[in-house]
Image: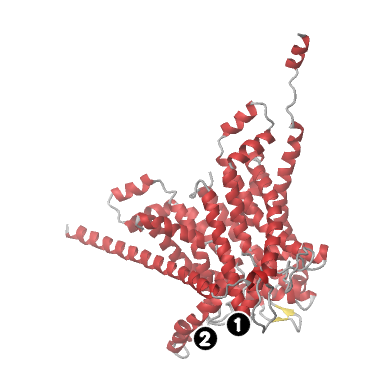
Amino acid sequence: MSTIQDTAGRRTTPRGAYFEPVFEGLCFAAATALLASLGGVLISLMIGGWPAFAQFGLGFFTTSTWDPVRQIYGAAGPIVGTLVTAAVALLIALPVAGAVAFFLVELCPPILRRPIGTAVELLAGIPSIVYGMWGLFVFAPFFAQTVEMPLMAAAAPGSFWEALVQGIPNGSGILAASIILAIMILPFMAATLRELLMTVPPQVRESAYGLGATMQEVVMKVTLPYVRRGAIGAVMLGLGRALGETMAVTFIIGNSHDFPTSLFASGSTIASTIANEFTEATSPMHTASLIALGLILFLITFAVLAMARLLLRNQTRG
Amino acid sequence: MAVSASRIASRQIANLVFAGFCILFTAFALAALAAILWSLASQGIGGVNLAILTQDTPAAGSTGGGLRNAIVGSILMGVEAMSIAIVVGVLAGTWLAEYSGQSRYGSLIRFLNDVLLSAPSILVGLFVYQLLVERTIGHFSGIAGGVALALIAAPVITRTTEDVLNLQPTALRESGIALGTPVWTVTRSILWRAAGSGMLTGILLAFARISGETAPLLFTALGNLNFSTDMMQPMANLPKVIFDFALSADDNWRRLAWVGSLLIAATVLAITIIARAFAKEPNRS
């Protein structure tokens, strides 16, 4: 009897409980590894890019001479190219993505809703190099023929328009790259917006319709304001993608380091410059300048993505 | 009455214009995306033959040849990346869902993981280049390529693992613990099993994401014109082959680039469709 009392008073540790802290420690280490890798990206870019910042100072941001032969590097061309292509891409993609999302949520016949919704989501996963290939071989010739040449012919000599459409009408350049970027971020933005719009409680939409609001009024004055923060977050995520996109742009932007002055001129973005030159960098300073470009891209996208995530969190996460 | 009638009319016109704009732009977007798929299929399928799988990338100017070295390289690096990313991602996601609680460190990691999820992949390539190619191994290698891809896949797995674990009811954890089971056994044998299909979806989506990634491979795995399974050496991979061949003037190379694009796009679509079939809730929000 006494033995039973003994064991009853003393609870045995369950089998395997000794590994409890080990498992928790492993999980913690894995989570910390993610933090470390993001920190590692930042630190490695700072260390690698430092020689370029030390050598050129502020001129690295403001000059646009990129000359590996004379060892002079100014990154204004790629920086402005990145910002301009991303902004123009967003300007094109935003109304279209909004239209697709509104169409799917409010207008689409139920029988088409699932197929179109699924197609949009699937297309969001197509790798960017495929968009780049298409841009180079299919879109560029089409764009040169139907947009660039007529526009250049129509622009009055000496006007502002003429300055804007200068360049070689070969289908590659700032505007062409922006359009490809827009097509690439479009499915992603449309899918996110649609998901957000579907979180609006049916009562909210139905009471607006019940008051006699038209579809346009329901969308613009009720459902869109309801998901406002999340929608801005989705747009910023799209912008983040456009800023950091490499392959789709590299194929079609023309890869010139000059400061872009016209929509049809060749240009470059930070990502395309790194992709094109990094493995062929001719000197340590060339490599350092490319890594410094990477750091600038990191800081821009980090700011945009951080803002996007902060805005999106309250909408889509409990 | 006249005023209100004209107001109703103008509202209806605005509505019609808006609806027309939505339909037109949707048609436009779908047409652009259909055009991409169409040129992919029409340009790619013509070049598909058995040699794609059995022969290596040809020299410039020659005819024939295939993509065997690139396909094998992509698979090897994909396997390496996924084996790292699954371990890190599942454990990190488990930590975030089960152990982090309300801690500030937990929300910091959650936030940074979300940023990492959509950070430019070319920067991951630059990081791995400096860490492995320049400082540790000393030259381009398949290993470095796999690590770069793992860094892109892990955040995806972390995020989905955390999300599906959070969907599991607290009662499930409590009932396990009430039976005297250690918490880590509850996590492994009950929670992971219950959340299995969702976690598998995340893993498949992560695989789809890395199978077309090009930028991080450019200066980690580099590429290799010959067949090689040595992970310590530069390794051929599909995206890099597409990039090089598409920008060349060689017709045969261009044909192979289209075939490669078709292969990648088909793989990604197939994986995504399988992943969606596994997902119990397609419209997680």
Whole-percent x, y for residue B214 in the image:
65, 67
Disc 2 sits on a residue from what chain?
A
Q: Are marks 1 and 2 on the same chain?
A: no
Q: Nearer the viewer, residue B77 or A143?
A: B77
Q: What element carries label 1?
A: helix
Q: Nearer the viewer, residue B44 or A104?
A: B44
Q: How crowded is mark 1: few (under 14 residues within 10 Å), some or many (20 or more)?
A: some
Q: Do residues under tags 1 and 2 come within 8 Å of each other at their CB atoms?
A: no
Q: Any mark on residue B116, and which?
A: none
Q: Any mark on residue A169, and which?
A: 2
**Is residue A224 shown above or below A22?**
below
Residue designated by label 1: B251
Measure the alpha-carbon separation of dots 1 and 2: 23 Å
Q: What element carries label 2?
A: loop
The amino acid type found where label 2 is placed reads Pro
Which residue appears farthest toward the left when viewing the image? B1
Disc 1 sits on a residue from what chain?
B
Q: Which of B271 and B174 is in front in this view?
A: B271
Q: Quadrant of residue A111?
A: bottom left
Q: Quadrant of residue A21?
A: top right
Which residue appears farthest toward the front when viewing the image? B50
Whole-percent x, y for residue A101 in the image:
42, 59
Report the residue at 27% width, 61% height from top: B12
Whether residue A188 is visible to the viewer of this picture, yes or no, is: no
Whether residue B33 is visible to the viewer of this picture, yes or no, is: yes
